[in-house]
Amino acid sequence: MRILFVCLGNICRSPTAEGVLRHQLQTAGLTSRVHVASAGTGDWHVGKAPDSRTCRAAMARGYDLSRQRAQQVSTAHFAEYDLVLAMDESNLAHLRVMRPHGGAGELDLFLRRYGAELDEVPDPYYGGEAGFEQVLDLIEIACQALIVEIKGRL
């Protein structure tokens, strides 16, 4: 199974989701059966590491994001990934527009699909440290539900 998380710049929310899911897959013994990546709809940060505040908040919870580098989502991703999960409605709308006709990958809003308290993962970029903690809280809960779905699919 192949999963792609998508946010705007691929430096805060989607790399956090990638790191959290990778960790949870390792704990569940599923790393060899699931490929996880992240991308952004924008190209501003391509090739850059996640935001330093994102990395600090993640590392404090045991998630190492240091090897990740931002990439921009492309139409090829829709054939490459089984599940493409957007962090918010704006990015979901962008993905719907760019999705090729007949694209095989499922496209959905990450939190809405996995029953978190909010439908969207708020962008912490312009806020304080508490925003990065909230993003982690929401993503950890949603990834637990995603692990249940993955186990059911495999």
Image (cartoon, rainbow, N blue to C red):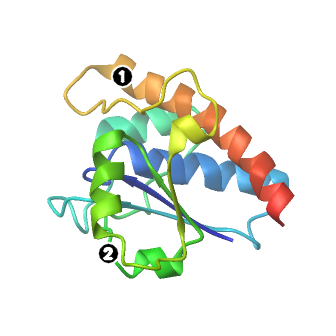
Residue under label 2 = 74
Q: Is residue 17 above or below residue 141?
A: below
- Image quadrant where one finds the N terminus: bottom right
Disc number lying in front (1 or 2): 2
Circle 1 sits in a helix, a strand or a loop, which is it? helix
Q: Which residue is mark 1?
A: 131
Place of residue 130 in the rendered image (x, y in percent of width and height, measured from the top left): 38, 17
149 sits left or right of 60 in the view: right
Residue 144 visible within the image? yes
Residue drawn at x 14%, y 59% is 44
Relative to 83, residue 11 above or below: above
Residue 43 as seen in the image, left or right of residue 32? left
SS at mark 2? loop
Q: Residue at x 51, y 47 (%)?
A: 17
Above-or-below relation of 42 to 23:
below
Q: Disc 1 to disc 2, how far (Cα)?
A: 28 Å
**Is residue 86 rendered to the left or right of residue 148?**
left
| Residue type indicated by callout 1 | Gly
Which circle marks residue 120 in the picture?
none
Residue 54 location (% of width, % of height): 37, 39
